[in-house]
Image: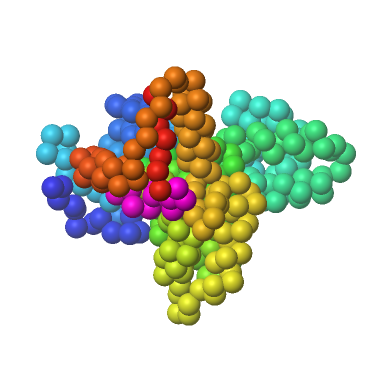
Amino acid sequence: MSDYYPEAYASSYITGSVLHIIFRNEENGYTVLVIKVKKSEPKLDEKKMSIVGYFPEIDSEEMYRFEGAYKEHPRFGKQYVVQSYEKLVPTEKEALIGYLSSDRFPGIGEKTADKLVQAYGENVISHVLDDPDRLKEIVGWNEEKRNKVYQAMLENQGMERAITRLTRLGFGMELAVKIYNSYKEQTLHIIESSPYQLVWDIQGIGFVKADRLGKSLGIKYDDLERVKAGILYLLYEKTMQEGHVYVPALDLLEEAGELLKERQPMEADLLAEGLRVLEQEEKVSREDQFVYVSSLYYAEKGFAAKIRKMADSAELEETFPESEFLEALGETEENTRLNMRNSRRKLSNRRFILKL
């Protein structure tokens, strides 16, 4: 286990430019690089420092600010493990104009950059990304021009803003990079408007973690989207993880009520409404009093239809009593260690016909 330096505390940071990348895993973004130190807190004696962390990408021509903690690697020595980071933007007027009109921002020339800086000052990028409609304030620009400027800034700075936002919401760098790689420029929109979507899209994020995010964003305990997410999460757990084909509706809603309750119980009518909407959205299917994940429902229907087709094309017929069928089913359950109790149907006939 690594020993952390005494100066490793929450307010520590290092700013600098990338000298070279030692190692990078393109699949998860894990990177080891060396920077030329410009500024640090607490102050470093070293002029160079090894940086370790997860990054969607690193631009060697940019300045970065890294926040994290120092550690001593048994082989590589002192390193800085990054918890969050951001790309630094020049603040002086002339430098900022030069930055915006560089190749980093395709479509933004010197005149356009000058107009932007005149209008919004040193925080021009934040102003535009936070509220693209503000570009309408600049006289003489049509919609195409405004979109081009916004997209150029989004492509250059959107990633760092999304990663920073995710880490401040409590996600580690590795998970933040995974989320960004899934949603790209839609990351901030999705996590702020549909945080429960992460449960289905991002491996490693369960309902509890997404629910924590939802609460931090002000989503109320009885919000219908939260209710739907809780029900669907439990249904997936029961079917995909525990091997059930379907779940009795009453059991599902009862467990969802336990999962979703806060200081007060979740109303039964709201749970029923959540299930009804999920069925309307074709995310779940119901038959009698049972609820399926829709994909499993149609798979089971297709399987049954295939068996019927195979049976109808056979020539021989053999009958056997219901007791023999149930005995064979019980042996199959025991041998395969599968709980198929919920898969049994009420049998309307006392005898079965198997066509061979």
Judge by depth and name the residue closer to the eye, 311 or 181: 311
Q: Position of residue 154 (x, y in %)?
A: 62, 39
Q: Residue at x 85, y 37 (%)?
A: 142
Position of 290 relative to 352 (above/below): below
Locate residue 247 relative to residue 283 in the image: left or right. Answer: left
Judge by depth and name the residue closer to the eye, 47 or 251: 251
Q: Residue at x 82, y 37 (%)?
A: 143
Q: Position of residue 174 (x, y in %)?
A: 36, 43
Q: Is residue 3 magenta?
A: no
The stretch of residues the image draws in magenta is 339-349
Locate residue 71 relative to residue 257 in the image: left or right. Answer: left
Position of 217 relative to 42 (above/below): below
Q: Is residue 47 visible?
A: no
Q: How many marks?
A: 0
Q: Quadrant of residue 54?
A: top left
Q: Is residue 185 visible?
A: yes
- Residue found farthest to the bottom: 264
Q: Residue at x 71, y 28 (%)?
A: 107
Q: Is residue 340 magenta?
A: yes
